[in-house]
Amino acid sequence: MTGIWDRIRGRQPELSCIELVEIVTDYLEGGMSEAERRRFDAHIAECDGCTNYVDQIRTTIVTVGRVRPDDLSDEAKADLLAAFRGWSQSGSA
Amino acid sequence: MDEHVEQYAAPAGQAEIVAALKAGDERAFAALVDEHGAAMLRVALMYVSTRAVAEEVVQEAWLGVLKGIDRFEGRSSLKTWIFRILTNTAKTRGEREGRSLPFSSLGGGDPDGDEPAVDADRFVGSGRDEGHWTSAPSRWSDLPESRLVGKETLEVTQAAIDALPEAQRIVITMRDVDGFSSEEVRNVLGVSESNQRVLLHRARSKVRRALESYLEGERT
């Protein structure tokens, strides 16, 4: 609810939950102005749902970090080490 | 890191790594390959069609790194420099295969349109509480720890990442799996900061959604 007095004083209207979920990445990336950050913090200070949402996103980031995608094959690594040996013995340094 | 690596401590600083490579320190090279190899493979896969070709691209890129190491001046980080050589190698190879570049369509436009991070029906549509949660997210920290770190949870996460549109999948993998900074992603992929952030935002939002339906769907 944006009151006329808020507008006169130049205050930003309160953030709603549906808006917050769209700027959570800006918040976590440190891509917000001081005023935007305060507005965000003021919202989560009073909203359990959004506090949980931000926590869920943080947990998501940690969980994605636990995924172990595939690596180079052992053959490819062995080939590389052989290539390295050849390179350093050829005296390029 | 692993116990079987004995007492060998890989050189940590950039200058030390470069010096070790020039001195022919094979274990320093192996450590560097271990550190970046998997991420290089994933980046290479953006440009070429098969895993086998991607592995060749990674190998070719490493040879380029060794050949060029004398010219490395430390103006960018070693990591950024390695990945630039990789993307250049991969692009050349991809062009030969006739593939279009994954980010070429992302310049200014927004191919995925406006997807909400959370379905609109989770929020009040009108009235005094417009825009507030109708069904608020729950506290995942109340779940048993084993639930969050379980094998199945990781499988759900992997499946959600695999299902993302390519550019989103690449960005979330580089950022949250491989630990690239946003600056490194920008440098390697040549995308703008805002583009990178939108892609990351969409990707994380979707993976969260998948985790939510998995974690909370089974609870009842």
Image (cartoon, coloured by chain):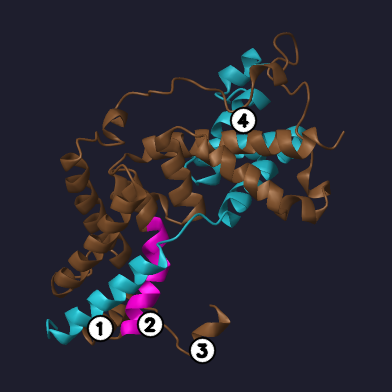
Chain colours: A cyan, B brown
Kindly identify which chain the residue marked by label 3 belongs to. B
The type of residue carrying mark 2 is Pro
Q: Earlier in the sequence, mark 3 or mark 2?
A: 3
- SS for callout 3: loop
Give B137 or B59, whichever is nearer the viewer: B59
Residue of label 4: A20
Residue B6: which disc?
3
First to last magenta residue range = B26-39
Do the dots labelled 3 and 4 sit on one chain? no
Classify mark 3: residues with Cα within 10 Å, few (<14), some (14-19) or many (20+).
few
Image check: A3 left or right of B219? left
Residue A73 visible here:
yes
Mark 3 or 1, which is nearer the eye?
Answer: 3
The type of residue carrying mark 4 is Leu
Q: Earlier in the sequence, mark 1 or mark 2?
A: 2
Mark 4 or 1, which is nearer the eye?
Answer: 1
Residue of label 1: B19
- SS for callout 2: loop
Kindly identify which chain the residue marked by label 1 belongs to. B
Residue of label 2: B11
